[in-house]
Image (spheres, helix red, strand yellow):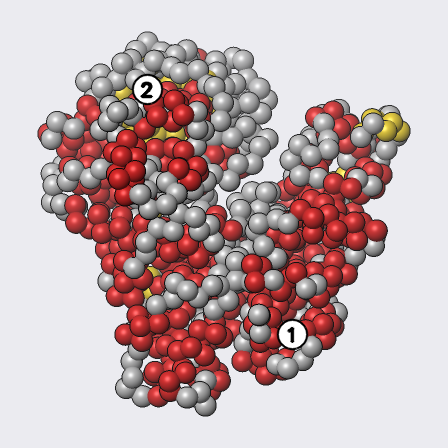
Amino acid sequence: MSDYSRRDFLRLTGIASASLLLPKFLKGNDTAAHEVMNRLLLQKTNGKRLIVIQLSGGNDGLNTIIPFGDDLYHSNRPGIGLKKEGVIRIDDHFSFNGSLSGLAALHANGEVALMNNVGYPNPNRSHFRSMDIWHSASDENKYIQTGWLGRWLDASCDPLNIKPHLALEVDETLSLALKGEIMNGLAMERPARLELILKDNFLQKTAAAWTAHEEDHHNVEYLHKTLAETSKSAGYIHDHLNKNSAKSIYPQHAFGKQMKLIAELILSGCETSVYYVSLPGFDTHAGQNNQQNRLLKVYGDAMKAFADDLKAANMWNETLTMTFSEFGRRVKQNASGGTDHGTANVLMLAGGNLKRKGILNEAPDLSNLDNGDLIYKVDFRNIYSTVLQNWLGADADLILGGKFDRLDFV
Amino acid sequence: MISEEKKLQHLLARAGFGATPELMKRFKGKDIVKVVDELIKDSNVIQDLLFLEKPDTNDKGEVRPLKLVGIVLKAKQQKEQLNLAWIDRMAVANAQFREKMIFFWHNHFATSGNIAWLCQVQHNLLRKNALGSFKTMLHEISKDPAMILWLNNQENKKDAPNENFAREVMELFTLGEGNGYTENDIKNAARAFTGWAVNKKGDFEFREKQHDFDSKTVFGKTGNFNGEEIIDLLLEKNQVSEYICRKIYKAFVNNEINEERVKELALRFRSNDYDIADLMRTIFVSDWFYDEKNIGCIIISPVELIVRFKNLCKLEVDDQQMIALQEILGQTLFLPPNVAGWKGGRGWIDTSSLVQRMHLPKAMLDAGTARLNKKPAFEETHEKNNQEDKKVKVKSDWTKLTNYFSTVEESKLTEEIINFLILAPKDRIQVNLIQENIDSSSRQRKIITTIVAVMQTPEFQII
């Protein structure tokens, strides 16, 4: 029986979300039954890690992975279009933005995959709304108030042994993406911040005093439970983090520090499966190139440093990074040397164990635009579905609330 | 048996921002129906929030295009100023009940936008109608400039209809998702709202040339409907009163719906021409509102929590930090996550926000150790590389509360403070743990530290 994965168990018993229903199985205080169930349901993370990197503000994909061989690229962007000396060639058609030398180095090793034209139908050009859609994985006209990784946590966590730190956002506050129906990930900008709870005697003791009341659905129980879980996760991170484990040099930038922290957590053997981190500043309506190139340099260099650290520890093969932005930008540059909010975009994957590498699909079609914007070809939820099912070993259809064809990059 | 005092505290928590020493003194011993009527009477006064000045206009009363750029650039800052002005108003207003209702409607008609002035205009629209007729409010908000821009009705033209407003007015404002309308209803209703736009003066304008005067079929009825008529057709549907009453019940009574009560309320609401004050009074004077299961069961929202701290112990932080505080706790006024508003309930609570909530009383006590940093907005570059935690000056004043408890016997102090501050079930509160954390160096210190410990319990987060 112990060979059953939790997922198999759920499937066999036909329970959509065990997290919701499980406590009802366990009525009474039969400790033997608890133990059996516990063993049966013991979370089996498959040892793989996902790092989601959010480029906030709408990164201009056309100046990131550049369709350099397309004349329309140059004619639409006489001012901000990159010139030969500013790019790193991939093939006859594509080039990296020259600031992405770090990522280009990974690409040369076959550790990068690039998916063009990722988006969704009827694209929304509001930062907030479009980010919401990406976080919740909802249709563009639906409002779902949980996130795809939060629902992954719901579906993956043993309800008797909840661990918010399995999905960790390196930030001050928790993004919608990591909020589930029943469970939430852990937000932590820096480990020192955990002291807020770890050093507060009163909070610690209140947390320690909690015991599960499975039949109690009152909000009082919910708050006590959340406090206890938070305290446990904070303690876990505090005890496991070996701060000097990352050896690479990371960019002197908040994002560099955040990627370094993630590397340290991984190298310290933390059981976290999903990490989430953001690099803001991509809303380049004016004077785009200076700003975007600077940010891409930070991004590319941090990626390289991160990959190097993980490779040195033989952990890069179990790691996948996925970089997205809430939308791309318009094909034509605007009058201020920038670009305005657009639609479909390139999504970048990196890791030591990609099944397909390099450019994964057709190039953006700059001759066939919708009101000056790229037309999406790949729904972002096909990527989520692939990552959830093929990489994290989760039930993607359950988590995404529908079937999205899986792709073959992992 | 629920004590009269507990009932009063429950009413004050739901119809306002919670019991304070002043309110307890004023209402203690009075019949609860009388208290309800006094709260409503206090709220009869409508005082607009007039914080931002109307942007400069030319002699035609129009905002110059260049000026508009400046307005948009300043939007974030100005919305923050408006936010702070409202928080202050909530804390000091005599019309607590009206403020609470405006707060509810701000989440219902959740709007933001790039022109702070229009946010203020809409805010005052909600202010005026918060306790009036939902029918009037719905008609007015549909022509509200901020709403028109927010839901893209500016782009809704005869030749290229934009369905955003038509969809949301049904899905979020009146019927609820998938509840009594079809995609075709949305398409046709959208045509009826074509030409509803905002002019350069910042006012509503009907643009005849952009309006589709042809016949439309909505909810099975066919006619040359205009926008007003669509709204009236909507209001004929029973689902509207049921949807609104369900939402009100969740926010003011209990997250767990009692469908029978909601049906009763909805019937009364629609037969009373959607009179909001009457609906709320009906709830607050009913016996079931004071049932044990309805008391102390709702997780307080971040803004209410902040106002509660302001009311009880004069919480004060500088302006930017007050915004940061809201962001960290997950609710920034005039900046709802989207048109669906804040999720509320357990959605307020995550690992980070709960700890921040529970840490706040301690920060107030220690005056100056709270650390707040917020996420950068989409528009900001925010070079955070060298930015370390800002130490925030958190000011507070505990005089009012210490005075209130000054005559309480030593042995009853903890119990009395718990009774005053906590509405949730008390069986998990560990009195011994609270007492361990008390500083007994002086009577005053003892009272303050007991209050802080009680405010640090999870139960304090529930009203």
Looking at the image, residue B374 sits to the left or right of residue B265; the answer is left
- Circle 2 crowding by C-alpha within 10 Å: few under 14, some 14–19, many from 20: some
The quadrant the C terminus of chain A occupies is top left
Residue at the (79%, 57%) spot, across then down:
B275
**Is B392 on the left or on the right of B418, as rendered?**
left
Q: What element carries label 2?
A: helix
* Chain under disc 2: A
- Residue A115 percent coordinates (x, y): 38, 18
- Foreground residue among B294 and A83: B294
In the image, residue A220 sits, relative to residue A155, either above or below, namely: below
Residue occupying the point 59% across, 43% down: B340
- Residue position for label 1: B94
* Amino acid type indicated by mark 1: Asn
Outermost residue toward the right? Answer: B223
Between tags 2 and 1, which lies in front? 2
Residue A327 visible, this angle: no
In terms of image quadrants, where is residue A396? top left
Apparent side of residue A65 relative to residue B130 in the rendered image (left or right): left
- Depth check, front residue: A272 or A219: A219
Three-letter amino acid code at disc 2?
Asn
Percent across and percent down for residue A292 are 36, 34
Residue appearing at x 29%, y 80% in the figure? B439
Quarter of image, res B34: bottom right
Distance of mark 2 from mark 1, alpha carbons? 59 Å
- Residue B365 or A343: which is nearer the viewer? B365
Q: Which of B246 and A344 is in front in this view?
A: B246
